[in-house]
Image: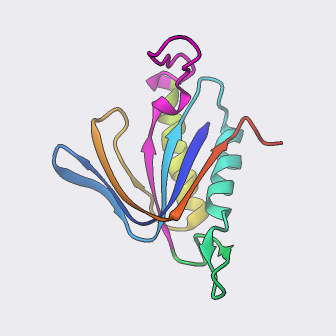
Amino acid sequence: MIAVIQRVSSASVTIDGKVKGEIKTGFMVLLGVTHSDLPEDIEWLGKKIVGLRVFNDEEGKMNLDLKTVNGDILVISQFTLHASTKKGNRPSFIEAAKPNIAIPMYEKMVEFLGQELGKPIQTGEFGADMKVSLLNDGPVTIVIDSKNRI
């Protein structure tokens, strides 16, 4: 499971001209699920996301986490994070999980993040044509792969 986490001042996702999810200060998370992901990946990655200390403290140092700054999370499914570009110029998405695996894992991650953060998580819609807007704060962008824990 791969997450691209962006610290944002605001973020939103629009589907068919209607805002589906929207946050102010927090994380916009692009989440890619692969066929080998397990429930342990959700727990490990979810705790990493909520626990990331990348918000500035009173001295301007990245030292505070989401809970401390009362931040929110917007999670967007993103199968293209598992693209392989080893051969040619057309990406292969063979490592991306099929919807029957990816959707339940995505939904479990959203649920887990909500439990860890103690508030509802904003989302897009799995498989939809989404328009994502964000104001990256910093910019701060961090990539975490649950398969690279060491």
Above or below, 122 relative to 38: below
Q: Is residue 75 magenta?
A: yes
Q: Which residue reaches farthest front?
A: 89
Q: Which residue reaches farthest bottom?
A: 58
Q: Which residue reaches farthest top?
A: 87
Question: Residue placed at 63% from the left, 88% from the top?
Answer: 58
Between 59 and 117, the one nearer to me in the picture: 59
Q: Is residue 90 magenta?
A: yes
What colour scheme has been applied to the protein in the rendered image?
Answer: rainbow
Question: Residue placed at 55% from the left, 11% from the top?
Answer: 87
Q: Position of residue 60 (x, y in %)?
A: 63, 82
Q: Position of residue 3 (x, y in %)?
A: 57, 44
Question: Residue placed at 83% from the left, 42% from the top?
Answer: 150
Q: Position of residue 106 (x, y in %)?
A: 50, 40
Question: Residue placed at 60% from the left, 23% from the top?
Answer: 35
Question: Which span of residues is magenta-colored?
Answer: 71-100
* Image label count: 0
122 relative to 109 in the view: left or right: left
Between 34 and 106, the one nearer to me in the picture: 34
- Check the picture and name the quadrant holding the N terminus: top right
Above or below, 71 relative to 101: below
Secondary structure character of the magenta stretch overall: loop
Above or below, 7 relative to 149: below
Q: Which residue reaches farthest right?
A: 150
Q: Position of residue 100 (x, y in %)?
A: 47, 24
